[in-house]
Amino acid sequence: MFSIDSFLELEKATIDKTRKELPGIAGTYPQIIDALLRIPQLILHRDPDLELKENTAFYYIHYLQAPSTTRVVFQCFETGHYLEALILMRHLLEAFIQMRYFRRHPQGLVQHVISKKRVSFRTMFDEFSPGYYQKYYGQQFSEAAHGMGMKFALRTIGEISPDGGSFHLGTRYNVDKATYVINNLTAIISGYFNQIDELLPGNRIGNENEFSDRFDGLRGWLNRALDELEKSKIGEIEVFDHYRRLFR
């Protein structure tokens, strides 16, 4: 009978297979998470009245949370928990679009946080890339958290045993699902890197020469990865236009 030991054995096998098949991802993402951990330590704390006026804590706390969530998403990716990765990735995406939107509309932030009448995510996404909300956020990220379609797509389709027709318990490496997850994560995290000066003005990354060079290198890696995906026509070409408008 399938047990927790069986479950863990499959996770380990999936990690080994993922790292073998996607070595560049396995080698680079720990560095990305390390950089995200360092960013909150390089925030210049300025005049308290100015920070209160600009609601700096709202942006700071999202960057403080980002490395933890990214780490867990990456663990889900490596162990083959693709559905769970997408559900958690939704949090990173929502945090990011809120930061971008309220940097453009700072007067609405406090009301959004404290009242029940909040700015909708449709409004936020449409501000930067009309069409993304319905087709990608709604039908994929939100569906993963609340619907059934993505559960079948990421947990069961292609996982039916040929000898018995039953669904597999546990995880299996699947190249299509794995790349779907990591490509989405790469797009979202590129936004945290590309928009850092807009979202956290006054950060001291540029003052730390060694880290600044490493940060720029990782930002370049993220952007090049997306550019190469677009050139290879992997996925819908339309989505790359959204990526540029949202995350570049």
Image: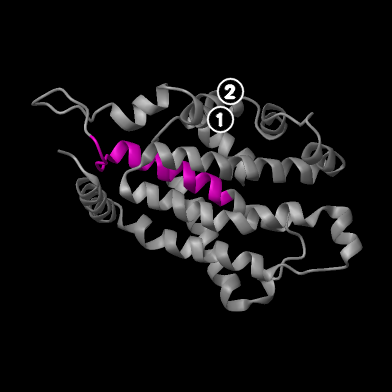
Q: Is residue 189 magenta?
A: yes
Find residue 182 and report its horizontal and vertical position in percent: 41, 45
Task: Write the start and end of the magenta stretch as one range.
Answer: 169-190
Whole-Å distance between the Cαs marked 2 and 1?
6 Å
What is the magenta segment's predominant secondary structure?
A: helix
Does residue 85 appear to the left or right of 135 in the view shown? left
Find residue 35 and report its horizontal and vertical position in percent: 54, 65
What residue does disc 1 label?
137
Q: Amino acid at mark 2?
A: Gln
Does residue 233 sit above or below 201 in this rendering? above
- Checking the image for residue 182, the label placed there is none
Q: Secondary structure at mark 2?
A: helix
Find residue 22 and report its horizontal and vertical position in percent: 30, 52
What residue does disc 2 label?
134
Does residue 8 appear to the left or right of 201 in the view shown? left
Does residue 76 sit above or below 131 in this rendering? below
Tell me how many marks there are: 2
The answer to which of 74 and 234 lies nearer the viewer is: 74
